[in-house]
Amino acid sequence: MSHTPHELADDFPGQTDKIHALKTANAHFARLMDEYHEINREVHRAETNVEPVDQMAETEMRKKRMALKDEIARMLAQA
């Protein structure tokens, strides 16, 4: 398993302009981005044992991160 943070710019290459436009124009999208970055940092800290958590908690954090990324992807596709 990779311990590299899942940055949205890396996950959605070529869409940084669209991400920025949506973030500034859509409060819901901006909130999703903030939540994604927060949970992404938590997952990365757990994976690297900076802030260890049990396996169940780490799995739940990953599921939340994926759900947020799915919603962000859906909004990017519709924009």
Image: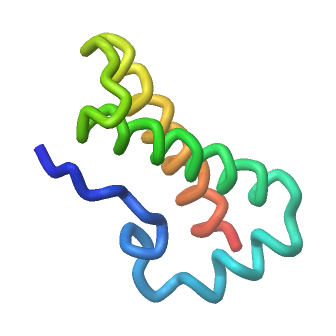
Q: Which residue is drawn at 37% across and 29% down?
A: 51
Q: In this figure, what is the number of numbered marks?
A: 0
Q: Quadrant of the C terminus?
A: bottom right
* Lateral position of residue 37 relative to residue 26, left or right: left
Q: Residue at x 49, y 31 (%)?
A: 64
Which residue ends up furthest to the left in the rendered image? 1
Q: In which quarter of the image is the N terminus?
A: top left
* Lateral position of residue 28 relative to residue 17, left or right: right
Position of 69 relative to 76 (above/below):
above
Which residue ends up furthest to the front in the rendered image? 50
* Lateral position of residue 7 relative to residue 23, left or right: left
* Residue 35 sits in quarter: top right
Residue 59 can be seen in this image: no
* Residue nearest the observer in this picture, 70 or 51: 51
Q: Which residue is drawn at 46% across and 46% down?
A: 40
Location of residue 18 in the rendering, given as x and y in whole percent from the top left corner: 65, 82
Residue 27 can be seen in this image: yes
Q: Residue at x 35, y 44 (%)?
A: 44
* Residue nearest the observer in this picture, 9 or 47: 47
* Residue nearest the observer in this picture, 12 or 1: 1
Identify the image's colour scheme: rainbow, by chain, secondary structure or one colour.
rainbow
* Residue 26 sits in quarter: bottom right
Position of 42 relative to 24 (above/below):
above
* Residue nearest the observer in this picture, 71 or 52: 52
Location of residue 78 in the rendering, given as x and y in whole percent from the top left corner: 66, 67
Location of residue 53 in the rendering, given as x and y in whole percent from the top left corner: 34, 18
Location of residue 65 in the rendering, given as x and y in whole percent from the top left corner: 47, 39
